[in-house]
């Protein structure tokens, strides 16, 4: 009698194990098939950004009421010439710290002159070092992050057909303000 009761239970366990294995297999197959289909339905054509914007803070630790020195670089990552306007390297500046943030924007106004443009051939970079004063009451001791945006919005023209119109985002850089008194 012992053998007879064991056989149906073993057969039942095998069926449940097989059902579980099939369910897990179907789940994995459905996830694999649905993932790419769902992604392709929502994707759109991605255009490559022709500019890479990098920022470095020369001295990562400065005294209160001092300034940080920003080393800025715009690199042409495209396969064609691009005209850039160095006057708008600091179009937008996002500075954050625990408990707050500021976002000064330096919109460029007026007509662009040929003298202010720089032509970057593929792979070439434009580098500039600029000070940024930390004299506002927002700046106290602590750790800060800074993120910059290059922004040029004049339309390309027959005179400037390679003029880049748009924005390029920099990396985020950390710096510290300490009380040096």
Image: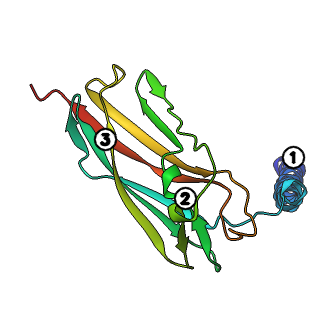
Tell me the number on the disc at residue 88. none
Q: Nearer the viewer, residue 167 or 157?
A: 157
Q: Earlier in the sequence, mark 3 or mark 1?
A: 1
Pair 1/2: label in front:
2
Label 3: state its secondary structure.
strand
Tell whether label 3 touches label 2 (CB within 8 Å): no
- Whether residue 41 sits left or right of residue 77 in the image: it is right
Which residue is identified by label 1? 5
| Residue position for label 2 | 85
Question: Which image quarter: residue 181?
Answer: top left
For residue 91, side relative to residue 4 (left or right): left
Question: In the image, what residue occupies the spot 12% across and 29% down?
Answer: 180
Mark 3 Cα-neighbour bin, 10 Å: few <14, some 14–19, many ≥20 = some
| Chain-order first, disc 2 or disc 3 | 2
Q: Nearer the viewer, mark 3 or mark 1?
A: 3
The Cα–Cα distance between marks 2 and 3, rounded to whole angstroms, is 27 Å
Q: Position of residue 80 (x, y in %)?
A: 65, 79
Please name whichever residue, 170 or 33, is drawn nearer the observer in this view of the structure: 170
In this view, the residue in front, 18 or 145, is 145
* SS for dot 2: loop
- Does 64 appear above or below 80? above
Residue at the image point whose x is 53% and y is 50% from the top? 88
Residue annotated with mark 3: 175
The image quadrant of residue 120 is bottom right
Q: Residue at x 70, y 69 (%)?
A: 159
Disc nearest the viewer among 2 and 3: 2
The answer to whether 33 is drawn above or below residue 109 in the figure is below
Task: Tell me: residue 68, above or below residue 50.
Answer: above
- Specify which label sits upstream in the sequence, 1 or 2: 1
Marks 1/2: CA–CA distance: 86 Å
Q: Mark 3 touching mark 1, by CB under 8 A? A: no
Estimate how packed mark 2 is, as few (under 14), some (14 to 19) or many (20 or more) residues with alpha carbons within 10 Å.
many
């Amino acid at each position: 009698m012992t053998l007879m009761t064991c056989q149906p239970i073993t057969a039942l366990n095998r069926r449940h194990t097989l059902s579980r294995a099939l369910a897990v297999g179907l789940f994995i197959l459905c996830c694999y098939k649905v993932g790419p289909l769902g992604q392709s339905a929502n994707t759109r054509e991605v255009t490559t950004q022709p500019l890479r914007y990098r920022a470095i803070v020369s001295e990562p630790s400065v005294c209160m009421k001092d300034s940080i020195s920003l080393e800025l670089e715009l690199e042409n990552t495209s396969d064609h010439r691009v005209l850039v306007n160095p006057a708008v390297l600091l179009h937008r500046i996002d500075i954050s710290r625990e408990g707050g943030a500021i976002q000064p924007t330096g919109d460029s106004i007026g007509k662009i002159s040929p003298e202010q443009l720089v032509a970057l051939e593929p792979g070439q970079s434009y580098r500039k070092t600029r000070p940024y004063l930390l004299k506002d009451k927002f700046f106290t001791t602590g750790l800060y992050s800074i993120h910059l945006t290059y922004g040029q919005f004049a339309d390309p023209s027959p005179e400037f057909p390679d003029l880049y119109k748009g924005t390029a985002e920099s990396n985020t850089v950390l710096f510290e303000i300490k009380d040096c008194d």
